[in-house]
Image: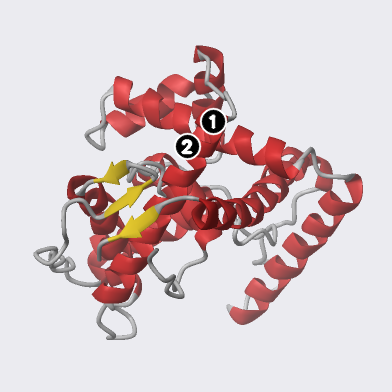
């Protein structure tokens, strides 16, 4: 079994961003749609919050913030990259996910002048793909399947996180990224089955009123800190939304944070009891 390396990015983010090497939420954000604020305090709440940083970095690059990152070196990547309980993770799937994360890391590091640690990033991406496959297998073993209604609801939720109002809008946005509708719905189905599996196994329900109030207080505090760091005056600061206006958004973020934390623990358990080989 491959020894874990310490990733630079939290694996809770990987849950939402790296389902079968394709990022639905991040890909939607790349289209330039409005990304919801991550100032609720649930910084590890999933790929939607992480995708917001990717969107910002890509916008900076398009505005002249730096040259396009060089293509990553994948010549030493084996095929398959890993095997998980008899299922293989191909070099092609790995490359798709790795190139997305490499470009993001390269753009984020332009300001520091530091090169991307490709060896560490490869190990991180491989582990993310293993974790997601383990969770997919766990969901399948638990008999969890996604109906058309479940898929539509998942796409609509992703859309809501990016300023969209329907599943059709999400499909159109992802088609701009080169995905076809069948692939999009397949990835949404995987996301639904994994999330449902985690919720059932970890007993995750709707957030309590106390949890939502804590998340709201953190959001307000972070907004005030951000305003102070940028030197904004009282008249320049964005008005803090009322709790009732962001309650649903906070509920999604709090639940997503719990799911991310549980996902890491469940994936660890499944890996220990399974047959996993990472060939990097």
Q: CA distance from mark 2 to mark 1?
A: 6 Å
Q: Quadrant of residue 234?
A: bottom right
> In the rendered image of this protein, does residue 6 appear above or below residue 201?
below
- Provide residue 58's location: percent of width, then percent of height: 31, 59
Label disc, if present, on residue 175 of the rendered structure: none
Q: Secondary structure at mark 2?
A: helix
Q: Quadrant of residue 20?
A: top left
> In the rendered image of this protein, does residue 143 appear above or below residue 133?
above
> In the rendered image of this protein, does residue 233 appear above or below residue 47?
below
Q: Residue at the left extreme? A: 75
Q: Residues within 10 Å of mark 1 (few under 14, many from 20)?
A: few
Left or right: 268 as drawn, with respect to 2: right
Label 2 close to label 1 by CB (< 8 Å): yes
Q: Nearer the viewer, residue 268 or 94?
A: 268
Residue 192 visible in the snapshot:
no
The residue tagged 1 is 141
- Provide residue 174's location: percent of width, then percent of height: 33, 33
- Provide residue 172's location: percent of width, then percent of height: 34, 25
Q: Please tell me which residue is depicted at 62% across the width and 57% down the height of the picture.
A: 265
Q: Please tell me which residue is depicted at 40% across the width and 63% down the height of the picture.
A: 1
Q: Residue at the bottom extreme? A: 113
The residue tagged 2 is 137
Q: Nearer the viewer, residue 275 or 72?
A: 275
């Amino acid at each position: 079994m491959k020894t874990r390396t310490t990733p630079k990015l939290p694996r809770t983010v990987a849950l939402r961003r790296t389902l079968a090497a394709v990022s639905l939420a991040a890909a939607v954000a790349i289209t330039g749609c409005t990304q919801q604020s991550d100032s609720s305090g649930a910084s590890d709440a999933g790929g939607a919050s992480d995708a917001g940083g990717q969107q910002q970095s890509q916008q900076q690059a398009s505005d002249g913030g730096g040259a396009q990152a060089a293509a990553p070196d994948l010549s030493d990547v084996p095929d398959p990259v890993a095997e998980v309980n008899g299922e293989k993770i191909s070099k092609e799937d790995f490359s798709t996910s790795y190139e997305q994360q490499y470009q993001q890391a390269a753009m984020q590091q332009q300001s520091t002048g530091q090169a991307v640690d490709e060896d560490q990033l490869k190990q991180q991406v491989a582990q993310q793909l293993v974790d997601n496959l383990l969770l997919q297998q766990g969901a399948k073993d638990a008999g969890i399947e996604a109906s058309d209604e479940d898929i539509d609801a998942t796409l609509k939720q992703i859309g809501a996180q990016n300023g969209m109002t329907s599943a059709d809008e999400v499909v159109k946005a992802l088609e701009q990224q080169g995905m076809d509708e069948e692939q999009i719905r397949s990835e949404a189905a995987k996301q639904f089955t994994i999330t449902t599996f985690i919720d059932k196994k970890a007993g995750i329900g709707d957030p309590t009123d106390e949890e939502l109030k804590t998340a709201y207080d953190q959001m307000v505090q972070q907004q005030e800190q951000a305003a102070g760091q940028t030197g904004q005056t009282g008249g320049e600061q964005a008005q803090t939304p009322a709790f009732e206006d962001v309650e649903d958004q906070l509920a999604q973020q709090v639940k997503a944070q719990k799911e991310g934390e549980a996902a890491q623990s469940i994936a660890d358990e499944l890996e220990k009891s399974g047959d996993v080989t990472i060939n990097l």
